[in-house]
């Protein structure tokens, strides 16, 4: 049973990495491997750049967002809002920034606002999308848009059914120490730490948008 | 159905992530969903911390390594060895550090040395494992050990059958600019950039081991 894979479009084309035709692989056939409750897998036959054929297996994913929520403590210092969540494939509780999958038809900012509110209870009035990351380029179409949020107000959280997570805060210094010592190993959160370090130092300034 | 709660704003004093029993999920049953050429997927029934049951689908992966290879140019400045590779799920050429999966029984350092040599032609005599990242904690067991390598010597590369990639070098400044402007979006490479920035600045010193 063949079906053609519709891939979510993600990210802007890069100025540097277009036009490498000698690396490209062309789709010959696309077959649905499996459609589970969550995983949707395809196996494509591809023509390699040397004319030979090969097989590529991958997960089709709707895309996701991550939010780096910035709080200001009583002394005027920045703190970030983080989560602890049990991640079943790793059989471990992981420290991570709030994140979640796009609902069908949902815009990235809508999703970021929804996930922040549902998972942490916070709403924010200042937002900026700083970039995108691809967590697993060899076997998934997933992208994760990276949002920063500030001017937070705490309300009630509304977790999905079967979703359990702890919310806590840390200073950027603490977070970076955890990235160094192996306490934080989640790739999206490590990527957020790169952004946070450079935003905090002023090396990567960002332009906030007020959203009321 | 969701749950709601109000959250304390205080920081957790400890980064330790063991012992969060209220988040744990227990395996009830495990079923192989499919075993492809590359993807090996499972569906487990789990008992959630509230006593209800749910389903978790995930990819089982052997683990991988990434290498951040440091060159010194004629002026004494550091450059990193990078690759351009077509990543079929994203239908794009991506910029990334050399990386690859562990062979059965292979040690992490062996794999790092092998992948560096096969993909780039370089061998190195100074190595250090700085950490590990988990690219996709919601649906894969994959981990990627992060290695730095220096004292490089160029030999011949030996790509896997059907593997095509370009090797090139960049300054850490160039790499960080690409992380900022969206040219680099691969999560493992973004994580490596966090390490590179902090190793270069002296904030995260590393202890090299000579391997001859």
Image (cartoon, coloured by chain):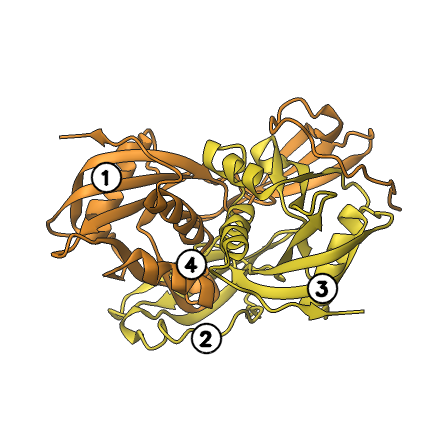
Chain colours: A yellow, B orange
Gap in Å between the C-alphas at discs 4 and 2? 22 Å
- Which numbered disc, 4 or 3, marks the residue that appears first in the sequence? 4
Label disc, if present, on residue A56 of the rendered structure: 4
Residue beneath label 1, please? B113
Q: Chain of mark 4?
A: A
Could you say which disc has been placed on residue A13 in the image?
A: 2
Q: Residue B59, how many percent across, how many down?
A: 53, 43
The local secondary structure at tag 1 comes to helix
Same-chain status of marks 3 and 1: no
Circle 4 residues within 10 Å: few <14, some 14–19, many ≥20: many
* Cβ atoms under marks 4 and 3 closer than 8 Å: no
Point out the tag, 4 or 2, that comes first from the N-terminus.
Answer: 2
What is the spatial separation of the Cα atoms under label 4 and label 1, in whole angstroms? 25 Å
Chain identifier of the residue bearing label 1 in the image: B
Answer yes or no: are tags 2 and 1 on the same subunit.
no
Decide: few, some or many residues near mark 1? Use Cα within 10 Å; few <14, some 14-19, many ≥20.
some
Dividing the picture into quarters, in which one does residue A44 lie?
bottom left
Q: Is residue A103 visible to the viewer in this orientation of the structure?
A: no
Residue at x 25%, y 32% (from the top left corner): B208
Quadrant where the N terminus of chain A sits is bottom right
Q: Nearer the viewer, mark 4 or mark 1?
A: 1
Is label 4 in contact with label 2 (beta carbons under 8 Å)? no
**Which quarter of the image is occupied by the C terminus of chain A?**
bottom right
Res B204 visible: yes
**Badge 2, how many Cα within 10 Å: few under 14, some, many 20+?**
few
Question: What residue appears at the point 33 percent right and 47 percent down from the top-left corner?
Answer: B99
Q: How far apart, in angstroms, are the residues tagged by discs 2 and 1?
A: 33 Å
Mark 3 belongs to chain:
A
Q: Is residue B93 shown above or below A64? A: below
């Amino acid at each position: 049973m063949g079906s053609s894979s519709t891939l979510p479009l993600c990210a802007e084309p890069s100025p540097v990495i277009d036009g490498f035709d000698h690396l490209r692989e062309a789709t010959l056939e696309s077959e649905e491997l499996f459609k589970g409750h969550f995983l949707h897998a395809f196996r494509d036959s591809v023509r390699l750049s040397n004319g030979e054929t090969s097989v590529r297996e991958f997960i089709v994913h709707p895309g996701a967002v991550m939010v780096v929520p910035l709080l200001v403590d009583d002394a005027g210092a920045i703190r970030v809002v983080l989560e602890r969540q049990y991640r079943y494939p790793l059989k471990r509780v992981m420290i991570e920034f709030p994140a979640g999958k796009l609902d069908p038809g949902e815009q990235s900012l809508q999703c970021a606002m929804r996930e922040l509110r549902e998972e942490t209870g916070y709403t924010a009035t200042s937002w900026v999308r700083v970039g995108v990351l691809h967590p697993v380029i060899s076997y998934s179409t997933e992208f994760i848009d990276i949002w920063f949020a500030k001017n937070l107000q705490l309300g009630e959280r509304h977790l999905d059914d079967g979703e359990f997570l702890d919310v806590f805060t840390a200073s950027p210094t603490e977070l970076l120490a955890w990235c160094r010592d192996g306490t934080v190993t989640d790739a999206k959160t490590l990527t957020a730490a790169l952004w946070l370090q450079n935003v905090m130092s002023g090396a990567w300034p960002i332009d906030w948008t007020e959203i009321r």
